[in-house]
Amino acid sequence: MAKSTTRYVCSNCGAVSLKYQGKCFECQSWGTLQETRVEAAEKKRQDSNPAHRSLLQNLNDAAPTEFQRTLTGIGELDRVLGGGLMQASVVLVGGEPGIGKSTLMLQLAPRLAPAKVLYISGEESPNQIRERALRLSIKADNLWLIPEVKLERILEVIEEERPALVIVDSIQTIYSEEYQSSAGTITQIRECAAMLIRAAKQQNVILMIIGHITKEGALAGPKALEHMVDTVLQFEGEGYQRYRIVRSVKNRFGPTNEIGVFRMDESGLEEVSNPSEFFISGRRTDVPGNSILAAIEGSRALLVEVQALVTKSNYSMPQRISTGFDLKRMSIILAVLEKRLRMETWGQDVFVKIAGGLKLVEPAADLAIAAAVASGLMNRPVDAATVCCGEIGLSGELRAISDSERRIREASHLGFKRIVLPEANTRELKPSLKKLPITIAGFKTLQDALAELDI
């Protein structure tokens, strides 16, 4: 008979200890060790038959398998997933409370008809889900609700019903009787997720798991949860804003860092077919401190408005505040402007914001940030028909960026007349780009680019 052993697992970092102690030896957190009972597995003798013992297979001998995708009927979601839901895949969806995770999952059901969809709700009752469906005008005869949090019962229902899609809302509410810890602890989240993933792979079921996030914005639970699933989708945006951005953080079957843009209306989440128009809508062209950036998010080119406000500081240490852009990188750009171009940014408060709630990490945003800051500092508006993108070096040079062709085409498609790029990206342009109704200007240094922008 298997022997029961006791372990103490840290709820903060997941470290395991054989005895209880007030402080975790790994992350040095106090009072985070939780008691967990684990059944020790009995040792099994190794099979003496070499045919059963050897599972080696040469890569060239592996038979190719054609994976089937299931289209969700939501274009932006299919784009983020890489073309649809992969058969027997596991998708983890995270985001702030009230941002639209459950609403998006509920909107999937009628689009997948007649396939059976199983909605496992650990947070809401069936009546609450029905009321929301009525409010959003969702009619899905193929959607079946189960208000259950016990893992063993959930696995039995999945095996009996054999649905095409299983939605778990949320993984933090599920618990297994095999472990003494309460629901939401690291042990319960890890083990329950592992059992659900195993059932999905064995029974060829698509599994979508909704997960909570911490106050820092990371997915709650062990980091191993993100490694176990096939795809991780992150909702971005604030609950009080209408627009939501769904970003692919991890995807084994498609590109990562792909985004989909949605609008929250009375009927639920609606697709934004042209995100570029959304990000630059409502901009003022006669105000200094604004510039347009051609950014790349996944496989998509987006035009984004960069806003900068430069004002005299009333403090001994000027403020540097950035929303949607790395603060350290902004400080580097300000240092280059002051050192190489003799622009006095010291003594000035500098505020930079990426309009629309988008977060930029690519180095191609440097030139647009510099143009917006210089425009605000010199009090000269940037030409409203010009787009900027380029990486800035510490000596003030402009370095080549990737995917310049897609940036040029997106700017031309939205009616912009000029795009400013590093010279390296303009040396060998395709003939099709030269026929576009847009002027492509390349420069070696930041000083030359700002002079072209009349700043």
Image: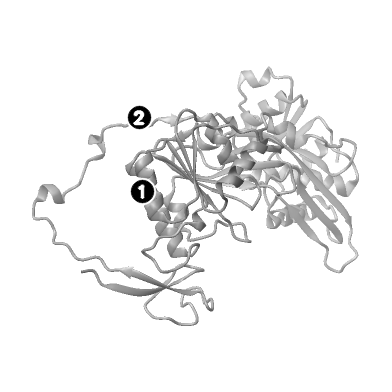
| Residues marked 2 and 1 touching at CB (< 8 Å) | no
Q: Nearer the viewer, residue 269 or 385?
A: 269
Q: Residue type at mark 1?
A: Glu
Quarter holding the N terminus?
Answer: bottom left
Viewer-proximal residue among 292 and 237:
237
Q: Position of residue 126 (x, y in %)?
A: 55, 46
Residue 54 left/right relative to 268: left
Residue type at tag 2:
Glu
Query: For numbered disc 2, what is the local secondary structure?
Result: loop
Q: How many marks?
A: 2
Q: x, y (%) of residue 391?
A: 67, 44
* Element marked by disc 1: helix
Residue that numbered label 2 is attached to: 66
Name the residue beneath numbered marker 1.
156
Residue at 43% in and 35% down: 86
- Label placed on residue 392: none
Residue 346 shown left or right of residue 261 in the figure: right
